[in-house]
Image (tube, grey):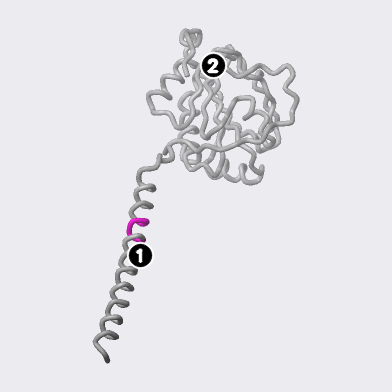
């Protein structure tokens, strides 16, 4: 092999090696960038799942707009046994509306705690209505039975009630006093002190007339 040809061959190999090295560095940089994007992106909240609801086709006439400090919008929904429940029929009792879905892991963890809460506040005549969002009655009934729920589990199958209450995430809590006034609206799982404070607001007559809170 002539010296010139040998030098040319080595030059070709050197160029190829440099090209491969550059490609390796580019790939390594991409991996680092990807990992950085994953670990610095805004995390999903651990206590709430956001979702979209379909626009209800139900007429909105004579429906009270939802707002803290205003009367709770009235509605009628069937439970998993087919029995209808009208919100206004519970006037005179403190009431907790709980909007949930089975695919929301936080919600399923909440259900046994809600049952315990329901039993604990039986002397206060606390009403809990667990409003399920858009799921099949058969599935909701099974979940209610699995958790031994003794309070009504309602079926919002067309999203009309969830839309009226401006529900955009699960779980959502709405605390309603004995006069039917919305005293608090909590999105996500509230801390124990927040939950107890809002329960006190609706179960204690004197507290029920004080300024509402979000």
Q: Residues within 10 Å of mark 2 (few under 14, many from 20)?
A: some
Where does residue 185 sit, x and y in percent of width and height? 51, 22
Q: Residue at x 49, y 32 (%)?
A: 114
Q: Residue at x 39, y 28 (%)?
A: 191
Residue 23's disc number? 1
Where does residue 107 sit, x and y in percent of width and height? 50, 38
Callout 1: SS: helix
Q: Quadrant of the N terminus?
A: bottom left
The mark nearer the N terminus, 1 or 2, is: 1
Quarter holding residue 146: top right
Q: Nearer the viewer, residue 68 or 120?
A: 68
Residue 167's disc number? none
User: Are the residues at dot 1 and dot 2 in contact (C-beta closer than 8 Å)?
Assistant: no
Q: Give the extent of the magenta segment.
A: 27-31
Where does residue 130 sit, x and y in percent of width and height? 57, 32
Left or right of 178, for residue 4: left
* In magenta segment, residue 142: no
Where does residue 60 sit, x and y in percent of width and height? 72, 22
Q: Nearer the viewer, residue 107 or 119?
A: 107
Q: Which residue is mark 2?
A: 68
- Per the model, the C-alpha gap separating discs 1 and 2 is 59 Å
Callout 2: SS: loop
Left or right of 82, for residue 69: left
Q: Residue at x 67, y 27 (%)?
A: 85
| Whether residue 50 is situated above or below residue 123 in the rendered picture | below
Q: Nearer the viewer, residue 81 or 12?
A: 12
Left or right of 189, for residue 17: left
| Whether residue 15 is situated above or below residue 199 in the rendered picture | below
Left or right of 12, for residue 176: right
């Amino acid at each position: 092999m002539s010296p010139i040809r040998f030098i040319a061959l080595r030059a070709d190999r050197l160029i190829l090696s440099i090209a491969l090295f550059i490609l390796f560095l580019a790939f390594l940089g991409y991996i680092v960038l990807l990992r950085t994007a994953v670990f610095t992106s805004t995390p999903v909240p651990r206590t709430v799942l956001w979702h979209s609801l379909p626009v209800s086709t139900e007429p909105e006439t004579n429906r009270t707009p939802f707002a803290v400090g205003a009367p709770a919008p009235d509605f009628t929904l069937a439970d998993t046994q087919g029995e209808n429940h009208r919100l206004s029929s519970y006037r005179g009792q403190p009431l907790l509306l709980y909007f949930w879905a089975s695919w929301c892991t936080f919600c399923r963890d909440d259900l046994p705690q809600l049952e315990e809460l329901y039993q604990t506040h039986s002397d206060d005549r606390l009403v809990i209505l667990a409003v399920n969002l858009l799921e099949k009655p058969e599935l909701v009934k099974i979940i209610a039975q699995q958790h031994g729920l003794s309070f009504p589990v309602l079926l919002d199958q067309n999203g009309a009630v969830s839309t009226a209450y401006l529900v955009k995430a699960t779980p959502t809590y709405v605390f309603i006093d004995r006069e039917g006034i919305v005293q608090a609206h909590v999105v996500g799982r509230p801390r124990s002190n927040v939950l107890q404070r809002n329960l006190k607001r609706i179960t204690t007559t004197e507290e029920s007339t004080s300024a509402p809170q979000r």
